[in-house]
Image: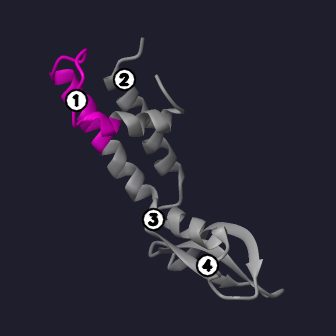
Amino acid sequence: MTSPADELRTAAELLREAAGNATPGPWRPHDTWLDHGGHTATVLTDRPDLNATELVAWLPTMSSNPWDETRNAWRNAGWMALMDPGVGLALADWLDAEAAHRNAVDVGQPMPGREHALAVARQINGGAP
């Protein structure tokens, strides 16, 4: 049986791996005009190391209206930009801190007020223990 501390550490490892493989942030949503006509939602990052703006994600929905809030592509772009690799690394640190705390106390006991980290870890790990 996997302990809650192990679940937390596993989720932290998954987050660190994914964040390490992603384009560095911060990310930002952008309304991009395509030469063949239409607007589409994208996620960009400014890369000082490259002196350039880099495309992180393109959501293939086109609209004749800029930043078309009636289409989920723009909302999804905003969500993706908010959850850039820096957020993933901060979440990983939080999950590791919670795992360390669980190791310092009786792991067999419920921990009221501290179950949020475990709920996040279980979502990252693909569900319930």
Earlier residue among tags 1 and 4:
4
Residue at mark 4: 69
Residue shown at 47%/62% (left/top)?
A: 24
Q: Position of residue 29 (x, y in %)?
A: 54, 74
Relative to 11, does residue 92 appear above or below in the rendering?
Answer: below
Res 100 label: 1
Res 121 quadrant in image: top left
Res 47 label: none
- Inter-mark Cα distance, 3 to 2: 27 Å
Q: Secondary structure at mark 3?
A: helix
- Inter-mark Cα distance, 3 to 4: 17 Å
Earlier residue among tags 1 and 2:
2
Amino acid at pointer 1: Ala
- Inter-mark Cα distance, 1 to 2: 10 Å
Amino acid at pointer 3: Leu
Q: Is residue 111 magenta?
A: yes
Q: Is residue 120 magenta?
A: no
Q: Position of residue 54 (x, y in %)?
A: 58, 73
- Inter-mark Cα distance, 3 to 1: 27 Å
Which one is closest to the eye, mark 3 or mark 4?
4
Left or right for 115, reference 112: right
Whether residues under marks 1 and 2 lie with C-beta atoms below 8 angstroms apart, the answer is no
Q: Magenta span covers which residues?
A: 94-117
Q: Secondary structure at mark 2?
A: helix
Q: Is residue 12 visible?
A: no
Residue shown at 48%/42% (left/top)?
A: 17
Residue at mark 3: 82
| View extreme (right): residue | 36
Res 6 label: 2
